[in-house]
Image (cartoon, helix red, strand yellow):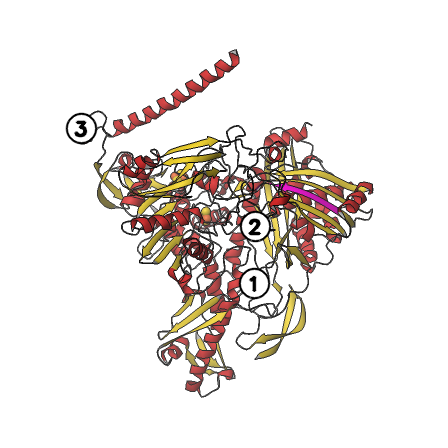
Amino acid sequence: MAKEVKLHIGVENDLEEIKVTIPDDSPKPWDGKDKLKFVGGKTPRLDGKEKVTGNAKYTFDMKLSGTLHAKFFRLPCPSAVVTKIDTSAAEKAPGVKGIVLVQETLPLTVRYADQELLAIAAETAHQVDEALKLVKVEYEKRPFVVDLAGAQKSDAPEVFQGKFERDKEVGQIEVDEDNAGQRRGNVRAPQDYTKGGTKEEIEQFIEKSEFSVSATYQTQVQTHSALETHGVVANWEGDHLTVWASTQGTFSVLGELAQVLKIPQTNVRVITDYMGGGFGAKFGAGPFGIAAAKLAKKTGRPVKLMFSRREEHVSGGNRPSSMQTLKIATNKSGKLEALSLVSRGSAGISTGAGTSAPAKGIYECPKIYTQDADVFTNAGPSKAFRAPGHPQGIFALEQSIDDLAYKIGMDPLEFRKINTMNHDVRQKEYQIGAEKFAWHKRNPKVNADKGPIKTGMGMANSVWYYFYGVGYQATIKVNGDGSVELLNGTQDIGTGSRTAMAVVAAEELGLKPHDIVVRIGDTKLGFGPPSGGSQTTAGITPAVRDAAYLAKNKMLEIAATHLNATAQELDIRDGVIFVTSDPTRKLSWKKVASKIPGGTFSVMGERKKDHIDIKGAPAVHFLGRNFYTIGGMQFAEVEVDTETGVIKVKRILAIHDCGRPINRLTLQSQLNGGIIQGVSYALFEQRVIDRNHGLQVNPNLEQYKIAGSMDIPEIETIVLDTNRGNSSTGAQGIGEPATAPVAAAIANAVYHAIGVRIRDLPMTPAKVLEALHS
Amino acid sequence: MEEKKNLSQKEISRRSFLKGAGIASVGAVIATTASVDIKADTKNDSDVIGKNGISCEFDVNGKKYAQKVPPRTTLAELLREDLNLTGTKVVCDRGACGACTVIVDGKSVCSCMTLAIDSAGKKIETIEGLANGDELHPLQEAFVNHDALQCGFCTPGMVMSCKNLLDHNAQPTLPEVRKAVSGNLCRCGTYPHVFKAVMDVSGKKGE
Ligand code: FES
Ligand code: FES
């Protein structure tokens, strides 16, 4: 049950014809030569009106009658053993209805400052605040360490004595199984990767090489700081639990709740109509979801538990720090010969600080050695953060590549070009980028400006991977009045997935995107993808198109009997079903819908495995598997004030590939967002923990600096039209590749401007001045 | 030795300063509510002033609400909790992000930093008051068309800051727009589209 179709695939206008076998219940993938009406166009969001009027209801806005408010009690001590918790006074406080302990048995080990111990639910939020003051805790303080360098010392206090207790929450990058036996103090068993030689051979090779660079880079801890904090509203009806969650993974929250509470998955429902940002930190139910569900059970009332801004910083997740020593060698003509990267990073009490993926995945280099190791510190757990490991890894890699290019006197862009010859997309992007940015007009000399304010240009490559899950189910329901509903349980994290789904369905059905009523964000509506790994569009749109294809066929069959034709002879366009050979024989969509036997029908499309593997670009080993690499790059122009040390990013040009773009309007927003977060990471953001007290000193939004309206550069983006024919829509992702290269591109531009490298993030004025004067 | 002592004295004086500041702000609350009879709620000295709430009248989006509010209630709490106007968001709860921006007597304010009782009797405009029934305010429409929102959580505050700008300056320059939203944090990074949207309604296409 399959058919063979001819297809034109390729990048932009470079198309080749191929033959693909596809299942009968799937449409022919969109062809590189197809002119589509809405796909690839600019469709304003379906839910834009709800969001600009304040009518969109987020978890934070949820109010069920009788809702209790809950908050965590957190111990402001970075390392301790809790021996006694006395809640007797808190229980009697006005309004208090219930208290649950995070861990029932004592002693309990506290490993980071402000770790949660228990949650209190009361009638009002103010009453919870009062009750929290009455909790008495007896604990023994322990030594602690919060900085990456300090934690690696042989006499450093051990964050985990004995076995590492893995945080079970979803959304943490686990690269390997824990090897407690091989952990040395706080440093976990290193993960090695070698290609073209042993570690020793590669390092010796670089040592002896005539053209090599070696440097150490440091990157800071960045917190996700989504504007809506983590949180849920939990409500039981009998043994059925409904949870409204600010999440980017409705199904992962469902799974975790069922597992931890030991109830069947059929008894849990997770709803996320709207959510105020996640960026990787919001996949799990988390201790807060579990506590709220338990409190709701205990009190028999709905319970709302949302993090405060402070909690969001200290315990909501973060991008791990890193310290990377990178050595690269090239031959005289600019061909890379060997690379060695030793990386240490801290994800606090959790794991996932590896940074080596870009070093393995961007350049063609015959000899590669990388080593990643997590270092535990007494700090809040990290979570996946938009392109985990990549902004860090690329910051180091792309500065070293730049360094090497200058060293052998080669144009940094040319140098990159000849070392990525196998990537068809990249080769195109270099050409377009250089032209648009007027790269060749830049002064090849560094530090060339005369005055105190110096300008510079730099660029950096990005890399991400093509991920998608299978088994997602999109349902399309056509009603007798012609209205169309599209159902799936996935959520819209802000990227516009709701709208992308409507665009795809409308394209196939010959309707307008705003004609489609999209219902998402509810696990009752069919299995859907998490918003992570830049895979939502790649995961869900093929299922949507398949469903629309089936719905269209059904409508054509119904119309056929009324038009004295066969379904094969018909087509749909602009809400009209007509005979292809004689368009005057036609019926409106509404008319045909009114003739649906039984008044309504629904069909389901399922996300299947891709029809073919993506050709064209090399695959890379990441997270234990091989993935097709998505190429992208960014160019930056900066102004550096050598008197104040202030870096001003003037403009960014971003060139990316995301397969077939579905909605270029929301795509543009997502690119802007990735770039702005990258600028912010490069120049401002940093979680600061006081070494002496172990407490975060900036758990707020005035001292934790985030780029604002005055810091936004001029942004230009170019998204290639890439058709791979791999799935029925050919969509890939963009959320993560957009943010990965920004800091590196800026750093390279800074070097071009002032002739000194800043190898430490964020690139603050103090660091610039220090670099200039050393 | 000497130095250490100085340091700890500094510590103390800083703390007592903070304490003093706290008292001062409580004083301010009492002063502004002087016209309200607070004795009714005060049985003895240790009682919290106005514990059971102070009766006030609020004018929100042209609608009048009579409400009893405890003095510590912020305007944001009043809107969200008591009046169920949840369009106004609270993100930092301390004046650092602008998500809670509303317009009071023609001035944009952070409703998380404004006491409800201070806004009694004044003209309060919130995001819910902008559209005319089903018809969006031109600014809202421009936000939708230019996709000046992603997750949308900062959007109500962002729109209110822009509305306030346009109320006072119908044809702002791009730097003026940037400045007007410089107190509004958007983590999704929608700024470029916000700029476009505002320039579009003001009739300028950016410069
Ligand atoms: S919530 Fe009011 S300024 Fe942030
Ligand atoms: S749109 Fe998400 S914070 Fe602004």
Spatial CA span between label 3 and label 1? 68 Å
Spatial CA span between label 3 and label 2? 58 Å
The label shown at residue A562 is none
Q: Residue at x 66, y 50 (%)?
A: A358
Start-end of magenta stretch? A339-346
Q: Assess whether residue A699 is covered by the magenta stretch.
A: no
Which residue is at the front of the view, A121 or A653? A121
Quadrant occupied by the N terminus of chain A = bottom right
Which residue is at the front of the view, B20 or A421? B20
Q: Assess whether residue A340 is covered by the magenta stretch.
A: yes
Check disc 1 and report the residue beneath it.
Answer: A731
Badge 2 marks a residue whose secondary structure is loop
**Placement of A270 over or under A571, stated as above or below:** above
Q: Chain of mark 3?
A: B
Badge 1 marks a residue whose secondary structure is loop
Q: What kind of residue is marked 3?
A: Lys
Which residue is at the front of the view, A607 or A177? A177
Residue A120 visible? The answer is yes
Check disc 3 and report the residue beneath it.
Answer: B43
Q: Chain of mark 2?
A: A
Q: Position of residue A513 (x, y in %)?
A: 45, 65
CB contact under 8 Å: marks 3 and 1: no
The verdict on a common chain for dots 3 and 2 is: no
Badge 3 marks a residue whose secondary structure is loop
Spatial CA span between label 1 and label 2? 24 Å
Check disc 2 and report the residue beneath it.
Answer: A173
